[in-house]
């Protein structure tokens, strides 16, 4: 103590914190511990070991600074490349979603057109079914008329014509007798075809009419049966069309839902495209700051090594 007060100052002991500071103290403590453990006793040997360790520290510091510089350059270039790549990929994703939305819009339009066509077809089938339904009673009436009533009428007419024919024959006989006695002139009564024969010809011409009417009735009955079956078939088709229309409505609802999902995804992609450059820049800034901190640490190591080379 007295020596210190008398002006004698003991040599300053170098500590790790003297050169490295508080931030890099643990690293320097380890380096000084290695140095103090392995330093030889003696002036020449101690100086050589110290210079060797100082040289290693300088090389390590320079190498670390180079790595930090290369890392900063890579981060700077990589950040720009990452921003461009993210923008490119997100743009491609947005284009794919836009294409998907266009395809869904086309599908939606096709479903709308198909539903309109089916609605028109259902209306047409409904009109045809109603027409057939209205026609069936008419065909029933025509079949009954041609198969029953008209043949009866023809036969009744033929019976009446038969009676008229007999009466006409009597009249022809009487008139012929009177004409033969000269009571009436031949110019007054001289028919080419007697009235009875004429009436007989008319009655004979009606003989084929009942058969023809029965054939008409049979054809009308067959047509009525076919139209009835056709009406049933059209009703089944109309039922199937109604089912298809229900399925089309469900498909249109699904397409609308998918278009909503695609719209939400496009909004999310747009938000990410707007925020991605900032996120990447912040990440690059964080890595850059870390590399700068490591570079400062290398400067401290370099300074320590340089100081060890300078010491005698």
Image (cartoon, rainbow, N blue to C red):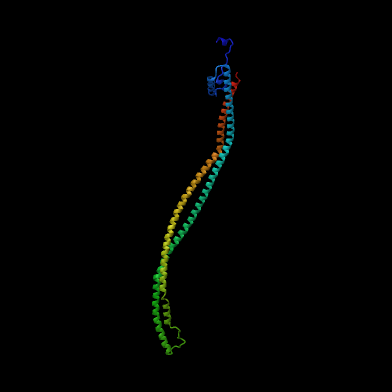
Residue 234 image offset from top left, x and y in percent: 44, 59
Residue 180 image offset from top left, x and y in percent: 42, 89
Q: Which of 56 and 297 is in front in this view?
A: 56
- 134 relative position to 273: left or right: left
Residue 176 image offset from top left, x and y in percent: 42, 87
Q: Which residue lies furthest to the bottom in this view?
A: 181
Q: From this view, report whether residue 140 is shown above or below residue 105.
A: below
Q: Quadrant of the N terminus?
A: top right
- Rendered residue at 54%/46% (across/down): 99
Q: Which of 133 and 174 is in front in this view?
A: 133
**Quadrant of the image occupied by residue 242:** bottom left
Q: Nearer the viewer, residue 214 or 90?
A: 90
Q: From this view, report whether residue 255 is shown above or below residue 63.
A: below
Q: From this view, report whether residue 138 is shown above or below residue 247.
A: below
Q: From this view, report whether residue 85 is shown above or below residue 126.
A: above
- Rendered residue at 57%/41% (across/down): 88
Residue 26 image offset from top left, x and y in percent: 53, 23
**Quadrant of the image occupied by residue 230:** bottom left
Q: Quadrant of the C terminus?
A: top right
- Rendered residue at 42%/64% (across/down): 226
Numbered marks: total: 0
**Quadrant of the image occupied by residue 174:** bottom left
């Amino acid at each position: 103590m007295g020596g210190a007060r008398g002006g004698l100052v003991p040599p300053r002991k170098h500590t790790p914190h003297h050169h490295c500071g508080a931030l890099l103290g643990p690293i320097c403590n380890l380096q000084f511990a290695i140095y103090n453990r392995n330093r030889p006793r003696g002036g020449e040997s101690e100086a050589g070991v110290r210079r060797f360790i100082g040289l290693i520290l300088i090389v390590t510091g320079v190498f670390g600074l180079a790595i930090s510089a290369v890392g900063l350059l890579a981060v700077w270039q990589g950040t720009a490349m990452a921003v461009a790549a993210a923008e490119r990929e997100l743009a491609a994703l947005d284009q794919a979603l836009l294409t998907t939305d266009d395809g869904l819009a086309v599908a939606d339009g096709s479903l709308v057109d198909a539903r309109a066509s089916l609605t028109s077809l259902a209306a047409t089938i409904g009109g045809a079914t109603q027409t057939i339904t209205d026609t069936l009673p008419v065909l029933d009436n025509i079949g009954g008329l041609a198969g029953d009533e008209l043949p009866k009428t023809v036969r009744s007419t033929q019976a009446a014509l038969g009676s008229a024919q007999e009466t006409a024959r009597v009249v022809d006989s009487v008139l012929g007798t009177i004409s033969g006695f000269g009571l009436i002139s031949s110019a007054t009564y001289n028919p080419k075809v007697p009235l009875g024969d004429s009436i007989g010809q008319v009655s004979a011409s009606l003989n084929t009419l009942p058969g023809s009417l029965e054939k008409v009735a049979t054809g009308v009955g067959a047509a009525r049966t076919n139209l009835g079956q056709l009406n049933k078939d059209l009703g089944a088709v109309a039922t199937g069309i109604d089912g298809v229309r229900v399925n089309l409505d469900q498909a249109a609802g699904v397409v609308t839902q998918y278009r909503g999902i695609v719209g939400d995804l496009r909004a999310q992609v747009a938000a990410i495209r707007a925020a991605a450059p900032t996120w990447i820049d912040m990440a690059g800034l964080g890595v850059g700051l870390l590399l700068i901190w490591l570079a400062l640490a290398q400067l401290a190591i370099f300074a320590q090594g340089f100081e060890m080379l300078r010491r005698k």
